[in-house]
Amino acid sequence: MELSMRKIRILFKKDFIDFFKNMAVFVSCIIPIAFAVIYKYILADFGIGALYLINMILGLNLAMISVMIPATTIAEEKEKFTMRTLMLSNVSGVEIFTAKILVTSVIMLISNTVIFFISGVDAKLLPMFIVITVIGGIPLILLGGSVGILARDQMNAGVYEVPVMMLFLLPSVFNGLNKTVDAVAAFTPCQPTLDLVYALQKGTLLSSDSLIRAATVLGWIVIASIILMVLYRKRGTDN
């Protein structure tokens, strides 16, 4: 177990450094923060409040970062045959994916925290906000890893990423439009997390509705884990 944790720490450091080297992914992760600044300071005259701001930008952040980082980085390593080298060096697929999940979670945590403070939400809510958003991002990270397994290279990953991100983001964007959209959004991995953040800000986090949303997120974690495991067994980590 100690050897496994040592490998994960080494992989974590490598993946974290590689994140800053991949400018396409790095710049994409800055986009939600840039939108938060625009909404907060440039469009402030339109009466955009903290609740709307944090839910709108947080949805973009969850859908973009959680899917893009694992998908692109896994595809990049397959393209450069780094993944094959790691596997030949007695590194397991579980260790590789664990490191990527941790790196994505840390980057998402940092980005979400920045958005939290930009939006002007009460700082005392930050600890629970972090817990909700990190757990809520796990199913999206796992699905992003699944995209990386399916992709042959980074370009191919980019083609797959966009529809996956839109599939999870658009129901949240149009949530509240009508009952049909609301029903669809409620069963996506993104909207329940946004609803939990909203409930946190409103002080209704311990309601029965919040328990249903939390159960939906946990259900998506199970579903996304199964999808990742099935694809890994069928496709592995190499082309």
Image: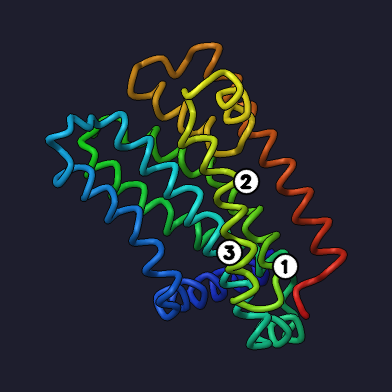
> Mark 1 or mark 3, which has the lower sequence index?
3
For the residue carrying disc 3, how many other residues have a C-alpha within 10 Å: few (<14), some (14-19), or many (20+)?
A: many
Residue labelled with disc 2: 139
Which image quadrant: the C terminus? Answer: bottom right
> Mark 1 or mark 2, which has the lower sequence index?
2
Please, is residue 12 above or below residue 98 in the view? Answer: below
Foreground residue, 217 or 174?
A: 174
Residue labelled with disc 1: 149
Residue at image coords 36%, 43%: 57
Please, is residue 80 above or below residue 48 in the view? Answer: below
| Residue 59 image position (x, y, % from top left) | 44, 42
Amino acid type shown at disc 3: Pro
State the SS at label 3. helix
Residue at image coords 56%, 57%: 67
Please, is residue 67 above or below residue 213 in the view? Answer: below
Q: CA distance from mark 1 to mark 2?
A: 15 Å
